[in-house]
Amino acid sequence: MRQVKTLGLLGTGVIGGGWAARALHFGIDVLAADVKPEMETWIRGAVANAEGALSRLTFAPLPPKGRLSFTTDLRAMARQADFIQENIPEQLELKQRVLADVSRHAPGDVVIASSTSGLLPSELQRDMEAPQRFLVAHPFNPVYLLPLVELVGGEHTSPQALAAAGSFYRYIGMHPLKVRREVPGHLTDRLQEALWREILHLVNDGVATTGELDDSIVYGPGLRWAGMGTNLIYHLAGGESGMRHMLRQFGPCLQWPWTKLEAPELTEELIDRMVEGTQAQANGRSIRELERLRDDYLVAIQQVLRQYNIGAGATLRALEERLYEQSGAVACPGIESALSSDSGEALRLIETHVRPEWVDYNGHMTDSRYLQVFGDATDTLFRYIGVDDDYRKSGRALYTVETHVTHNAEAKAAEALYVTTQVLAVDDKRVHLFHCLNRRRDDALIATAEQLYLHVNTAAGKAAPMESLVRARLEKIRAAQAGLAVPAQAGRSVGMSRT
Amino acid sequence: MRQVKTLGLLGTGVIGGGWAARALHFGIDVLAADVKPEMETWIRGAVANAEGALSRLTFAPLPPKGRLSFTTDLRAMARQADFIQENIPEQLELKQRVLADVSRHAPGDVVIASSTSGLLPSELQRDMEAPQRFLVAHPFNPVYLLPLVELVGGEHTSPQALAAAGSFYRYIGMHPLKVRREVPGHLTDRLQEALWREILHLVNDGVATTGELDDSIVYGPGLRWAGMGTNLIYHLAGGESGMRHMLRQFGPCLQWPWTKLEAPELTEELIDRMVEGTQAQANGRSIRELERLRDDYLVAIQQVLRQYNIGAGATLRALEERLYEQSGAVACPGIESALSSDSGEALRLIETHVRPEWVDYNGHMTDSRYLQVFGDATDTLFRYIGVDDDYRKSGRALYTVETHVTHNAEAKAAEALYVTTQVLAVDDKRVHLFHCLNRRRDDALIATAEQLYLHVNTAAGKAAPMESLVRARLEKIRAAQAGLAVPAQAGRSVGMSRT
């Protein structure tokens, strides 16, 4: 299967737009195909709309954004794409026909995946050419924020296609969940549907409103489900004998009439009740407003889960590790050139933008965010010299002793910035750094940070010599930069007399 | 109904222990009653175990912790408690008998609530004395962290009892959800059970393992459910016409064979498969370890949701507002006393805790968060001297020119901190501040920040004299502190020569 540089989208609704936003953000070009030309404007809007939340999902260094193009010619898309994701309406015959046609124009090593939420891959691949490269890859809304994608192979699907699809989805920050056997609704929607059917009954019977039923999850089990599923949670509830105890105790309840089984008829009255209920919950807020709220908490929760390395947080952490690794090779050419010559340039370690939430009431980047950006630059340097997670796990680290920040100009929202770094001095236990934060537009100096770091044995809580290789790498950079002038701001102290 | 000072617990298992921990934390005395004397040690252990997570849930000022006592005499408990929560095993006849007996010893204005997850209040209250004060109040594990409690009245339950119970549960930080009509399993467990039944089928049919099924929720819908329920989420997925569109599009799927209806038989083989699956998920971690992990992310997620004021975060926010009000804490008593005397103390401007998300890979507060806390202290001072939103709207502001931070010790997650501030100097256009960040536990100095601010005309982008009143207030503080020594860290510059 080929390396994916261009993702082809077959169909551009909410799901197609979500795929586009996610792929572009992680550096994949997207060629969106839809028979309706007006969808070009639509998908560009959807991508722009997703960018606000996506830009806050991770601050790890990203590759250059992908480019979005659009065509009404599905076959032209099929000839150019390296991977095709189908998102057309959920009708079996329509999907079969379009997939068969597209498969005749896409080279045989191009994976074709369907976003279908319930149809079976064996049926969808029936009339395709090279059906072994077809699979179902079912994502969840919003596709640009939720990592889950269910992968389901049909009877003709090859293990190679499944493996290639898994790699691609992981590359764009997702958690591919391989479903062992094709069943209608795959896994997730079977579970969601069981729950939703009971909701419809309870609304139909007048037991509860849609809002009360949402509250019955959101304030309780829903919180747990962000990090652990029903099985592990029940295992915890079972005390020392875990799941076995749970099944013994609660097994009999399965026979109690706790849930309705058949689905209720969707009468006009039930539809009205569902609609009125959710309108009351929306409480005058537009879909756009609610989407923003949803996206905000989805981003924040994933950042929280990352700290505990579970669920979507584990996915995010794995993604970031790859991004850092990748950027170490590509995004910091400054380090290599500084080391390979005695040109004495400062290292250009970090490229960033002023995130909207970094801006304070004055309309400028908040003080603490300067230190965040400078800290990112230091971390990049530390990773390069070998002070990484493994080094820290061995009980050694570099701690900040002091920092002096000077402000020369203001950074405004969305401005592009970069940091250059000089190693002023290094000895066995200490390293003295000087960072400049510059505006990309005109290279104007925005701020500086002078920092002293102490190398410590973390278990003993005491200063200790750094590993010789770390020391040597720092020394090599210092030596290469020895010809650089000491910046005017270095060695200065804060005070009023000087101005 | 009476004011609740003492909560009586009837039964002390996992649920009883959770109630005890929550009530004690929010200042309610707990009298736990269990016929087995060995449960005293158990419940004290459970309370101690919950305290770690509870202590990080909110940093708002708490009333003094409640006291825990224990008795094996259920009737004595009934005579002393102001509110009784029953948590004995889930057997109808047992509950009926014990509740009837206890109701004969509890005064008539004492609410009696059952934690039952599925039994009906009308049946439970059948043989009670004063059955109007009885209701079902069903909590969720861990009771000390999840805010949801379902309130269900039976045919004899009075509106007063429901209202009093609602107030009490809100007082201890919960979200009471009133269920309109008694149905087996109430609301939440009907929904959870529908989902779990489908899980059992999919495991039974060999379609997926328990871990895969947990993943199918945790990486997707579970993230959404921490903040919004199925109905609102489907409303969002329906585009501009929301829920109505959703029902039209997906309604027909309800008739598809997406879920199994009857529960599967719990054969020994299915039980083994469920147990082996969850053991694989636990991956060697003990129930205690997994509980700690669960509690950690539940705390952190609720703090995230609080920022967006939704779901459990809205509950937490409401709780904190009440706690702040209750504590009657004046925002900055330090300022008034510093100004009303010439005691010359540094101003104690900020009390805070190290939030879990402020901690870096070294397990300490990240550098940039120091500047955030110092910035909060500066903002508090600025508001006091009159530099607030109105002042800034008039085109004037104080901009940071430079900052020098020194680190003396590490701040760890959840540690309580405070900032004291000295005005070192002030002139027409500038103010020179010095902050100390201290640990509350032992007043140890953690870090210092020396800062120079310049007063600017923001439209012109130029330095300009501050308003005389602002200048006068700063001068008054400076004069009151003139007797204080200039801190050793002030006026220092960063460098390696000095150490």
Image (cartoon, coloured by chain):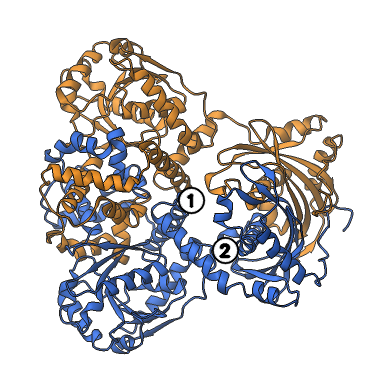
Chain colours: A blue, B orange
Q: Nearer the viewer, residue A481 or B246?
A: A481
State which quarter of the image contains the N terminus of chain B.
top left
Q: Pinpoint residue A440: horizontal percent, then vertical percent.
A: 66, 74
Residue B47 appears left or right of B61:
left
Q: Chain of mark 1?
A: A
Disc 1 designates what residue? A307
State which quadrant residue B70 falls in.
top left
Q: Residues within 10 Å of mark 1 (few under 14, many from 20)?
A: many
Residue B393 seen in the figure: yes
Disc 2 designates what residue? A355
Residue B389 appears left or right of A143:
right
Q: Earlier in the sequence, mark 2 or mark 1?
A: 1
Q: Residue at x 26, y 60 (%)?
A: B243
State which quadrant residue A319 falls in.
bottom left
Q: Residue at x 23, y 88 (%)?
A: A104
Q: Amino acid at mark 2?
A: Arg
Residue B1 seen in the figure: no
Q: Pinpoint residue B60: horizontal percent, then vertical percent.
A: 53, 35
